[in-house]
Amino acid sequence: ASTREVFARCAPLLDPLPDFGFDAQARRFYNCLPRLLQQAGGDVSNVTLERVFFDDFDRDMRAFHGIREAFYAEAGVSGDRLPAMTYIEQPPCREAQQLELQVQAVIPKPNGSVAVESFVDDATGATVKLLTIDGRRHLYIADIKGLAADADATGTFREQADRMFANAARLLKPFGARFTEVLRTWCYISDIDRNYDEFNLSRNVFFQTEGVTRLPASTGIEAGMWPSHALCSMDLYVLLDAEGCDIEIMHTPTLNEA
């Protein structure tokens, strides 16, 4: 009743593709974003989450950080007011396109309000966004990884996956939540053909330990992570105040169950 939720996907080039390099493509997107949000009655300060898909981390990450930080600084958004960010190395389909972005914004209506709190987990680098809307708290945690404390000890995929799920459970605890309350996950897996079985084994054990029976809706895709020795990562969403809400698993006869 008091907010509008806006999702924007931007592929910053239209056919025929002009000869734009990474910097020009990134600037073109961020120049366009305020106009998109204005059409929905909002502005840049309303952005809560971003996902960026890179063609090449090593080549473009430094440039992207500079362009993004300059854009938000000019809009008066800095520090913990910056959107939570997930970095994914997954090249766009079109060869000339070097990045693609997804943005989520929560825009107050004229008589509405959104309270946003931000936290960064120093141990993992994950970003937590807690949005309070109409008395209900919406918890988003972005870029949860399972890296070891020793950066040189990469470990196996299974070890990282186990730590990632354990980190997710730890990050929920300060909000009085358990993984049984998670409604949505986004899982990113390196070399998915090789590692998906191990990922599922790790998740099954974790769900059994946590007592998860209502499975969260989930996306699982192949991706490279940042930093490069990360082999998996996860974002999640929890509705902390679910009293009075009907939550059920949806089924379709045209798809196999995940």
Image: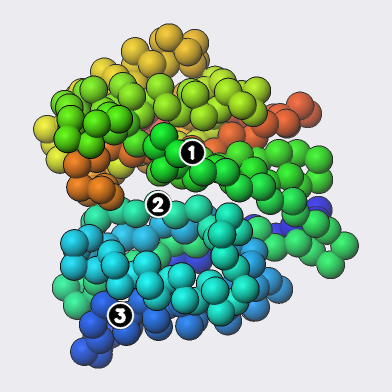
Q: Nearer the viewer, mark 3 or mark 1?
A: 1
Q: Nearer the viewer, mark 2 or mark 1?
A: 1
CA gap, disc 2 and disc 1: 14 Å
Instruction: Return the disc, 2 or 1, that comes first in the chain's sequence.
Output: 2
**Residue 149 placement (x, y as % from top left):** 30, 30
Q: Residue 245 vs residue 60: left or right?
A: right
Task: Reply above or below: 254 against 102.
Answer: above
Q: Residue 204 vs residue 245: left or right?
A: left
Residue at label 3? 23
The answer to whether the residue labelled 2 contacts the one labelled 1, judged by CB atoms less than 8 Å apart, is: no
SS under mark 1: loop
Which image quarter: residue 108?
Answer: bottom right
Q: Nearer the viewer, residue 50 or 65?
A: 65
For disc 2, the neighbor class at 10 Å (few under 14, some 14 to 19, many from 20) is many
Looking at the rendered structure, the kind of residue marked 1 is Asp
Task: Reply above or below: 171 against 187.
Answer: above
Residue at label 1? 121
Disc number at residue 52? none
SS under mark 3: helix
